[in-house]
Amino acid sequence: MEKLHFITLNDYTTESGKKISVKLSYQTFGKPLYTAPIVLVNHALTGNSNVVGENGWWNDIIGKNKSINTDEYTILAFNILGNGYDNNAKNLIKNYKDFTARDIAKLFALAIDLLNIQHLFAVIGGSVGGGIAWELAALKPQLIKHLIPIATDWRATDWIIANCHIQDAILNNSSQPLADARMHAMTLYRTPESLTQKFERSKKDNTLFNIESWLSYHGKTLENRFQVSAYKLMNQILRTIDITRDRSDFLDVASNIESDIHIITINSDLFFKSDENWHTFVELKGVKDNVNIHEIKSIHGHDAFLIEFDQLARFLRPIFKTKVSSHKKKLEALVA
């Protein structure tokens, strides 16, 4: 595993008015910082900064000769504060409702400034990671060349907020909060058709269906690698995605983002609905030329961005085949 690095962020005031000082952890992969175009990868709800290599959760997309080629790009990935991956007890968040998705984006922006990074070739993230990508782009409209939000949107809908409310209730009231919250979430991340294809009402034994065993397995597995405080915080971040809060309307905010925007949706997503992504695209296309949309076709629902790698790679490949040399020259000019 690539070494964890830390950036100290002193006296940050959250959107709710709380002052904190934290050490934000991150990892880099591929080319060393400042030698190549930088791609920021935002992890999903139970993910972390380990995107490439041993146990890398996106090895099918990022790596040598992959869609995002580590021989041509620097990969930067922050751990969302409080996710527990850095094993720093001081970074675990108890008062999780003090934080919003915009707080996380602001912390990332501060860290990017401290790293003296003035330009990102791309920011990419799935689900809550994509929501944070939207928030970062709204905060820093000139920072990102390619904004790539996957299986997400620029705000949490009422449907997302409703399910986050249920998750929060499970996490605060269940006798086995992590396992139970994860089992509930898995039924949202997949579709009925996906589960039917996988299990077909088969049984593990006379008393247990394989779908029940599978859900229990995912619940117990999360208990072994995640913490309740982290799940509560990530759930809170998910429900607070909204680039328009305390600003103007969506078109005013989004039209100021200079990035080429590449929305990637999933036709069967039961969480961030495809219809809503297409509505976002149509609205934005009316005021901004450099916006595109791609749709993953899958029966697997929200989790398809972690399953349908061939389709995702086909959408990403043209973006990351852009001539790297021109971006290197721009990078050198910015750092000079």
Image: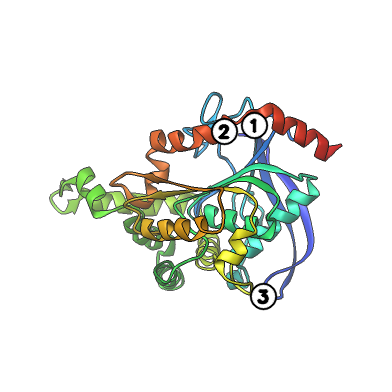
Please, what is the three-letter code of the amino acid marked with disc 2?
A: Phe
Is residue 4 at least partly visible in the picture?
yes
Q: Position of residue 179 (x, y in %)?
A: 39, 59
Q: Which residue is mark 1?
A: 73
Locate the N terminus by quadrant: top right
Residue 75, position as x, y percentages in the image? 63, 37
Q: Secondary structure at mark 1?
A: loop
Q: Residue at x 76, y 44 (%)?
A: 117
C-alpha span from label 2 to label 3: 38 Å
Residue at point 66%, 47% (across, down):
144
Mark 2–mark 1 Cα distance, whole angstroms, equals: 9 Å
Judged left or right of residue 114, residue 98 is left
Q: Nearer the viewer, mark 2 or mark 3?
A: 2
Q: Residue at x 23, y 43 (%)?
A: 198
Badge 1 density bin: few <14, some 14–19, many ≥20, Cα 10 Å? many
Q: Is residue 9 left or right of residue 130?
A: right
Q: Are marks 2 and 1 in contact (CB under 8 Å)?
A: yes
Camera-side residue of 267 and 169: 267
- Residue position marked by numbered label 2 in the rendering: 320
